[in-house]
Amino acid sequence: MNESTSEPITEFTTTVPFWSPRVTPVNLDDATEEELDAMKVTPSDTGVSEYVLVLAYDPKTLKERTPLFNGIMYSRGGLSRPETELGAVAASVVNRCIYCAAVHASRYNELTDGETVMEAIFESGEDADFDPRPKAILSFATKLSKSPSEAENADVNLLIENGLGMDEILDLVLSTSLFGWANRLMHVLGDPIPR
Amino acid sequence: MLRYLASSFYISNGRRAAHRLPASAFDPMPPLCYSDAVEDIFDTVLVRAAGITADHPLAGVIRGRSNIIELTEKSHDAALKPEPTGGFTHSQRAALACRMARINDEPSLAAHYEGMVDAEDILTADPSFDGADDGRLRVIIRHTDLVTRSPKDAVAGDIDALLSTGIAEGDIVRLSELIAFVNYQVRVVAGLRLMVAAL
């Protein structure tokens, strides 16, 4: 494990980096029953990730956040999967969370079988130019991610004009806001390191 | 509960290939059946702050995501009122949450959190207060404000500053979850209010 000696990535990418924590993760062997229970909700392919082991210091929020995350990102109905990912990417670009942006931009590309939208976003941010509906979604999610939010009535009206129903707008609000949460953990508590 | 865990496990393992599966493979979040389940989604911090009642035109849309509203309420309780409290009392947590709501121009959430703050912590809730001569509080407030206003500018040195003030690693994570949760919550409320205005 020499990734902690690599320089963190500072430019957006669709190649998912490693994540190197800035605090010492909970040692799995020393974890309390409550910490183990909270981590069990997020088993991963290769064992418990360092990210989850860091969040295990606060098992009560971890236990609620994991099903909340899955519920917002993967529930059936409402906003389409790629448009849900677009909200996540918009937040991650505003908050410059390289890791989150990489995960969700690559997922958007898989879901849409294309790379031009993400390339434009990484190149030009909220000024990126493409089809009106994803552009309206990107614009709203970008403004909602500012602190305080800069989203206005006109931005919601533009979503409606582009065919989004209220159920879809709620899902967009949720996925964008969720990454206001996730980015503030991922980007603050660790560094994205080249694979 | 078992079905719920199985669903969550499946999603986290299968997410890369998930979009190639037929729609029927996507279980929507099953209803939660915890003993401490939220009784009424319209009587939650989030939905009350947005001013949406059970007879509101958006009530049906809110009900469609009742699982998310419930989990948001439980996350609120986990971030604001955990037992044991860790390095921050409930009142200190609420004071920081109130401060973050004010920074985000969310007066209804700020009022909710202000009601949970003890007199000795009320200054912390004022965004113009910097901690004065309390060194630990100064570092906590500086970090809270930075990650609330401009998370993109947070660097490794900001975590070092918390550590060198003697704040335990576990408490750094607990503070981070509190900051992150409130910043999620203020955005959902802001979005819901815009949805109400668009009707």
Image (cartoon, rainbow, N blue to C red):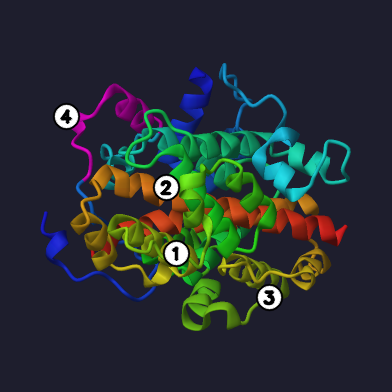
Q: Residue B177 carries which label?
A: 2
Q: Residue at x 73, y 42 (%)?
A: B48
Residue A36, by quadrant, is top left
Q: How crowded is mark 3: few (under 14 residues within 10 Å), some or many (20 or more)?
A: few
Question: For mark 3, what is the residue?
Answer: A131
Residue B68, by quadrant, is top right
Question: For mark 1, what is the residue?
Answer: B145
The chain identifier of the residue carrying mark 3 reads A
The secondary element bearing badge 3 is classed as loop
Name the kind of residue labelled 4 in the image: Asp
Name the kind of residue labelled 1 in the image: Asp
Cα separation between marks 3 and 2: 36 Å
The secondary element bearing badge 1 is classed as helix
**The magenta segment:** A25-41
Task: Please indicate whether residue B13 sits to the left or right of residue A129 in the image.
Answer: left
Residue A66 appearing in the image: no
Question: For mark 4, what is the residue?
Answer: A29
**Is circle 3 on the same chain as circle 1?**
no
Q: Which of A150 and A111 is in front in this view?
A: A150
Q: Which residue is drawn at 53% across and 60% down?
A: B126
Nearer the observer, disc 4 or disc 1? 1
The mark nearer the N terminus, 1 or 2, is 1
Q: Does A26 appear in magenta?
A: yes
The chain identifier of the residue carrying mark 1 reads B
The chain identifier of the residue carrying mark 2 reads B
Q: Residue at x 78, y 43 (%)?
A: B61
Nearer the observer, disc 3 or disc 1? 1
* Quadrant housing the C terminus of chain B: bottom right
Nearer the observer, disc 3 or disc 4? 4
Name the kind of residue labelled 2 in the image: Glu
Cα separation between marks 3 and 1: 36 Å
